[in-house]
Image (cartoon, rainbow, N blue to C red):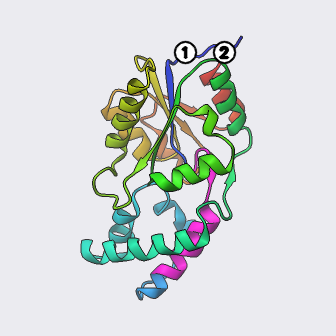
Amino acid sequence: MAESPYSCVLWDVDGTIADASVGILRRLNVALTHFGRPAPTREELIHWIGPPMFQSFQEQAGMTPEQSSEAVAFYRTLGKADGYTTDVATYPGVPEIIRDLHAAGVPQATASSKPENQVDAIIDHFGLRPYFLATVGATPDEATLASKADIVVEALRRLEERGADTSRPVLVGDRHHDVEGGNVNGVPVIFVEWGFSDAHEGDEAAFRAASADQLRALLLS
């Protein structure tokens, strides 16, 4: 039977488990045009996918916090109308790793900067609910619980609450926010290279994986 060197696994969602970029780009185009800002190109999506949208509207579109709150609310309305799973696909081989970790008795949780209701929708849509002990995401306002560091803490707390061993955790993610959020909490990070990121974003990660096979080798032996 396969075994893992880790007592539990935390998963980022966007760019790690699921590719939601098609829908994100479409909604951003509508939202930014609505607020009189230029729409991003697909190449520029790297700056939007990963951090909380409240932060991105300020950093990428030059909005004030008040304008950003309004833009996030508008963007979320679009997302709800769109359906949170429209045009979302999982990355090849990743759901199989999640299932095999569960079969090996390894507790798993999401640790995503997406609002938690959207994380739940994606996990349920792809039939992954049985393999996760907890699904953790940001609060809808992206204010109470938004930073990756805080989300990692909350994910570990919920796993402990459900009786999981969190003594040897690992976080799987694709952005520097994942690396920073893991490192600040003493959680090693496996940086996956198939998401929306520059290669250097994984420089401070404990490990890198360029393919699902490489990720599997790091998580299961």
Instruction: Kindly report the secondary structure that dominates the magenta region of the rendered protein.
Output: helix
Name the residue located 60 percent from the left edge and 23 percent from the top edge.
219
Residue named by callout 2: 221
What is the secondary structure assignment of the residue under circle 2? loop
From the viewer's perspective, tell me whether residue 80 is left or right of residue 141.
Answer: right
Residue named by callout 1: 5
> Whole-percent x and y of residue 85?
63, 60
On screen, residue 58 above or below 180: below
What is the secondary structure assignment of the residue under circle 1? loop
From the viewer's perspective, tell me whether residue 161 is left or right of residue 48.
Answer: left
The alpha-carbon separation of the residues under discs 1 and 2 comes to 8 Å
On screen, residue 200 above or below 31: above
> Mark 1 vs mark 2: which is more N-terminal?
1
Regarding residue 138, the answer to whether it shows in the image is: yes
> Whole-percent x and y of residue 178?
43, 42
Name the residue located 40 percent from the left edge and 17 percent from the top edge.
167
The residue range painted magenta reads 14-31
